[in-house]
Amino acid sequence: MKKKISVLIADDNKDFCDIISEFLQKQEDIQVVGVANDGLQTLDMILQLKPDVVILDIIMPHLDGLGVLEKLNQEKLDVYPKIIILSAVGQDKITQRAILMGADY
């Protein structure tokens, strides 16, 4: 049996998290391993759960998505998750900075 892709959803909008989680759970090859609603919780869950993919919002309380990327880069992980930035913020400078900090898409 093929291993499922583990996904962590990180967004402060709980309704959005519910929608994306419900959609992803219907995919046969994906397993949502957690939902975080702020940046500090996101970082803790990445380190604890070691997901394959993180869907990361830019604007979150306590630590924004760029802060999560910055702190994640300071960690000595064996394998870094693929990071997908998903945000209403459409500024190119923020997107470019996220990519430079390790976001994959």
Image (tube, rainbow, N blue to C red):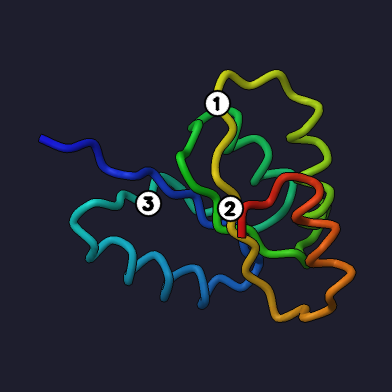
Is 103 in front, or is 48?
A: 103
Left or right side of 75 for 26: left
Helix, strand or loop status at disc 2: strand
Left or right side of 36 for 75: right
Q: Which residue is mark 2?
A: 36
Residue type marked 1: Val
Q: Of label 1 and label 3, which has the lower sequence position?
A: 3
Quadrant (top left, top right, bottom left, bottom right) of the C terminus? bottom right
Picture layout, residue 33 above or below residue 26: above
Picture layout, residue 82 above or below residue 16: above
Measure how far apart labels 1 and 3 are at the Cα level.
18 Å
Residue at 57% over, 18% down: 78
| Cβ–Cβ under 8 Å for marks 2 and 1 | no
Measure how far apart labels 2 and 1 are at the Cα level.
20 Å
Is 78 in front, or is 64?
A: 78
| Cβ–Cβ under 8 Å for marks 1 and 3 | no
Left or right side of 31 for 33: right
Measure how far apart labels 3 and 2 are at the Cα level.
11 Å
Label 2: few (<14), some or many (≥20) within 10 Å?
Answer: many
Helix, strand or loop status at disc 1: loop
Of the residues tagged 3 and 2, which is closer to the observer? 3
Q: Which residue is mark 1?
A: 79
Residue type marked 3: Val
Q: Which residue is mark 3?
A: 32
Helix, strand or loop status at disc 3: strand
Label 3: few (<14), some or many (≥20) within 10 Å?
Answer: many
